[in-house]
Image (cartoon, rainbow, N blue to C red):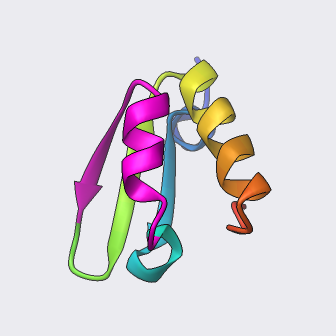
Amino acid sequence: MPDPAILRDSTQIVLPRCALDGLRDGVCERFTVTVVERDDEYRIIGSPVEIKAASDFLARNGVAVA
């Protein structure tokens, strides 16, 4: 059985709120993802393919995605 942490990492990106300033709409328009707002962070949730593409998009726009 796969490790749940590995599956979670491939289906979500967690970022501080300030990291998506000006990019949130672009992420939602370009990719089939759900953006969940928490107190001080955004959680971007989607399929592994969409998360990879969104991660690449964010990296191209200067957002460090671990």
On the image, which quarter does residue 16 sit in?
bottom left
Highlighted magenta segment, given as a residue range: 21-37
Q: Residue at x 78, y 54 (%)?
A: 60
Q: Residue at x 57, y 34 (%)?
A: 51
Q: Position of residue 52 (x, y in %)?
A: 67, 33
From where the camera sits, is residue 52 visible?
Answer: yes
Position of residue 54 relative to residue 1, above or below, is below
On the image, which quarter does residue 43 sit in?
bottom left
Q: In the image, 5: left or right of 20?
A: right
Position of residue 60 relative to residue 56, above or below, is below
User: In terms of depth relative to the viewer, which is nearer, 10 or 15?
Assistant: 15
Q: Quadrant of the C terminus?
A: bottom right
Q: Position of residue 55 (x, y in %)?
A: 66, 45
Q: Residue at x 65, y 54 (%)?
A: 58
Position of residue 21 relative to residue 44, above or below, is below
Q: In the image, 49: left or right of 30?
A: right
Q: In the image, 18: left or right of 1?
A: left
Give the number of marks.
0
From where the camera sits, is residue 10 visible?
Answer: no
Q: Is residue 29 magenta?
A: yes
Q: Is residue 32 magenta?
A: yes
Q: Residue at x 36, y 73 (%)?
A: 41
Q: Quadrant of the N terminus?
A: top right
Position of residue 64 relative to residue 55, above or below, is below
